[in-house]
Image (spheres, rainbow, N blue to C red):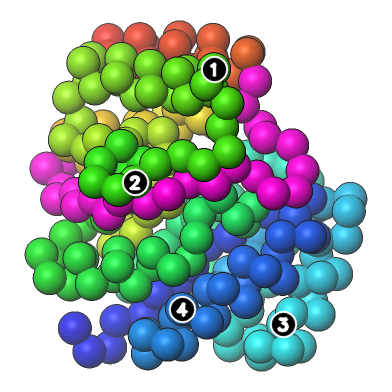
Amino acid sequence: MAGDKYSILLPTYNEKDNLPIIIWLIVKHMSLSGFDYEIIVIDDGSPDGTLEIAKDLQKVYGDKKIVLRPREKKLGLGTAYIHGIKHATGNFVLILDADLSHHPKYIPQFIELQKRENLDIVSGTRYRGDGGVYGWDFKRKLISRGANYLSQILLRPGASDLTGSFRLYRKDVLAKLISQCVSKGYVFQMEMLVRARQNNYTIGEVPITFVDRVYGQSKLGGTEIFQFAKNLLYLFATT
C-alpha cells in the first residue's frame, strides 16, 4: 500500500560494536527496497557508550532516519517497545535485536509477505523452510527446540517459532498485544503470539537464519530456562 511507513525499534544495552553495523544494514536493505522507514534506538543507559555511537550515526544518516529515545536505566524489553511505539510515526512496527542475530536482509521479505496476504503480524522463524540457527552448540539448540516444541503442544499458537523476536506488526495490533501481555523477558515474545491467536490476528512467517551474538554475551542462561518453563505453564493455565 502506498503511504506505509515502517518504524524499526532497536532496544539497545551495551551494543556499541554492533550498532553501526546493524544500522548500516537496515539502511542498505530498506533503501534498496524503497520503503519509507525510521529507526528508533531505545538505549537503556548503556555504560559502554552505545548512545554516543548512536548520536554519531544520527549525524551520518540524519535525524529523520535515526530517532534517539534513550531511557535512564535498564527497564526491560516490554517497556522498551511501549516507549518505542509512543514515538513511532509509522503505521507498521518492526522489532529486531541490535546484536546482529537478526539480519536486516529479511526485512523486505517480511514487508512483501505482509502486503501480499494483508497480515497483522509477520514473524521470523528458525524452524521452517530454510530457517535455522548458526553458532549455537548442541545444548542450546536442544533447549531452544525443546522449549519451542513444548510451547507448541501446550499453546497451539499457529506459528512455528515462538521465542524469536524478529517480527513485523501493524502498530495498533502491537499496542493492543502489549497491553494484554503480563510476561517479562524471554517469555514475553511467546505470549505476544499466544495473545495474537486469541484476538484472531493473522500471522505469517518468513524463514530466517538466526546468528548467535558476534560481540558480547548471550542473555540466555539456566535460570532463564527455568523461568521460561514456569511462565509457559502459567500462560497455558490462563489462556
Q: Nearer the viewer, residue 124 or 227?
A: 124
Residue drawn at 58 percent across, 60 percent down: 10
Give the residue type at disc 1: Lys
**Element assignment for label 3:** helix
Distance CA(mark 4)–CA(mark 2): 19 Å
Q: Provide the residue designation for mark 1.
A: 139
CB contact under 8 Å: marks 3 and 1: no
Q: Mark 4 or 2 closer to N-term?
A: 4
Q: Mark 3 or 1 closer to N-term?
A: 3
Tag of residue 131: 2
Q: Quadrant of the C terminus?
A: top left
Q: Mark 4 or 1 closer to N-term?
A: 4
Q: Is residue 234 above or below residue 70?
A: above
Give the residue type at disc 4: His
Residue 196, percent from left and from top = 23, 41
Distance CA(mark 3)–CA(mark 4): 18 Å
Q: Mark 3 or 4 closer to N-term?
A: 4
**Element assignment for label 4:** helix
Name the side, left or right, on which 233 lies relative to 78.
Answer: left
**Element assignment for label 1:** helix
Distance CA(mark 3)–CA(mark 1): 40 Å
